[in-house]
Amino acid sequence: MGMTDNLLSTSQWLITAGLFVVILLLALRTVDWAAFRNDNALQHSFFGAAVVLGFVWQLRAGISPGLAIHIFGVTVITLMLGWALAVLSGLLALVITVITGREPVLMFAANGLITVMVPALVSHAIMRWERRRNFRNFFAYIFFCGFFGAGLSVAVAGVIMCLMLWISGTYGFDELVHEYLRYLPLFMIPEGFINGTFVTGLMVFHPDRLKTLDQSRYR
């Protein structure tokens, strides 16, 4: 989403930094590091996803600061790696955008929270919901976790970002509606399509790469 310097108040910056640290520590504690070290395929997926996202996030559109539009791709990474590793992989990708000058270091926590952590947690919540409903058709995983999950994760992240910019006084509500919110449903469609397509391809050809997929549930 591209938060730049001076868009948030000092109190907002501190709150986002605090939430960022809490979620990061939780992710670090959640990962099974012994299994990660012994799983070469998982390591390749982790670092490969970081590199791919780091370069995909270079491509963005937008006029006003903080209201940039780009493909997130966090949902498919969450389904591949689990939410904790997805957060860490996404943050590595964000480091790439900082190195290339696309994102400021000062706003790393805010961008990490909105671009990586919120979409990963929303995607994880939808995956858990799909699992609790105990659907027996694998199309449920593809549609709810892949297509729908990706679109909803972008919507939630976008609304949170707009609320932060509105509360800080950077933009008025009418400006946010005119320049971003009214286009949000249009952002959700390509996000859902791209993530859902990748999830479908992985489920067909490499289901073992989807760590959140319980193949025994589907007929």
Image: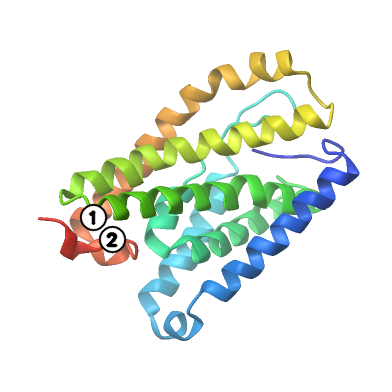
* In the image, farthest residue toward the left: 219
Within the image, what quadrant is residue 114 found in?
top right
Q: Quadrant of residue 158?
A: top right
Q: Tell us which disc is closer to us: 1 or 2.
A: 2
Would residue 55 be found to the left or right of residue 188 on screen? right
Q: Residue 54: horizontal and vertical position, in percent?
A: 57, 53
Distance between mark 1 and mark 2 Cα atoms: 8 Å
Q: Left of 60 or right of it: where is 46?
A: left
Q: Taking the image as drawn, is residue 108 in sight? A: no
Q: Which quarter of the rendering shows the N terminus? A: top right
Q: Residue 40: percent from the left, percent from the top?
A: 39, 79
Q: In this view, does 163 lie to the left or right of 130?
A: right
Look at the image and tell me whether residue 55 can be seen. yes
Residue 213 disc label: 2
Task: Answer left or right for 178 relative to 30.
Answer: right
Residue visible at 71% across and 13% down? 174
- Residue count near mark 2 (Cα–Cα under 10 Å), binned few <14, some 14–19, many ≥20: some
Amino acid type shown at disc 2: Leu
Numbered tag placed on residue 203 in the rendering = 1
- The image position of residue 51, as x and y in percent, is 52, 59
Residue at 73% from the left image edge and 18% from the top image edge? 173
> Nearer the N terminus, badge 1 or badge 2?
1
What's the mark number on residue 109? none
Q: How crowded is mark 1: few (under 14 residues within 10 Å), some or many (20 or more)?
A: some
- Are the residues tagged 1 and 2 within 8 Å (C-beta)? yes
Which residue does the image show at 48% across and 23% down from the upper left? 185
- The image quadrant where one finds the C terminus is bottom left
Element under label 2?
loop
